[in-house]
Image (spheres, rainbow, N blue to C red):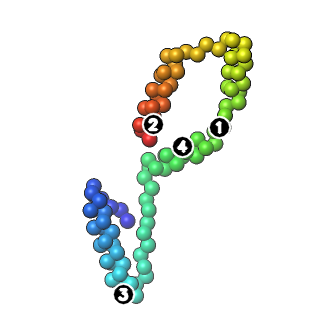
Amino acid sequence: MKVNGTGVTDVLRAYAGQLKSKKADAGRGAAPVSDSLEISPAAKKMRFYLSALAELPEVRKDLVESLRRRVNEGSYKPDAGRIAAGILEEKALDKKI
């Protein structure tokens, strides 16, 4: 079922009309009509990205080992500006989701 409209009442009205026609068809012995679902291109893209994300390793062992070694040597000097930029970028991405 494809519903065009912006309000919840439009959706309810369309679905109620569909139910009435199903009941009328059932009374006449017609085969029942099933609901259908159409996935938007944006949802398909999101599903693709989520499956790609699921394939990534949860922990980047090479990066963790490199950071651990640099901390132990005392050569690790974090860049505060880069950290702040990353936090802001992550916050902006969270708003999109």
Residue type at mark 2: give it: Asp
Q: Is residue 18 left or right of residue 89?
A: left
Identify the residue shown where x is 72% and y is 24%: 65
Q: Earlier in the sequence, mark 3 or mark 4?
A: 3
Identify the residue shown where x is 41% and y is 75%: 33
Q: Earlier in the sequence, mark 2 or mark 4?
A: 4
Residue 17's image quarter? Answer: bottom left
Judging by the rendered image, the residue that carries numbered circle 1 is: 58
The residues tagged by marks 3 and 4 sit, at their Cα atoms, a distance apart of 46 Å
Which mark is in front, 2 or 4?
2
Residue type at mark 1: give it: Glu
Give the answer, above or below, for where 4 lies relative to 95: below
For the C terminus, which image quadrant? top left
Disc assigned to residue 27: 3
The residues tagged by marks 3 and 2 sit, at their Cα atoms, a distance apart of 51 Å
Q: Is residue 34 left or right of residue 66?
A: left
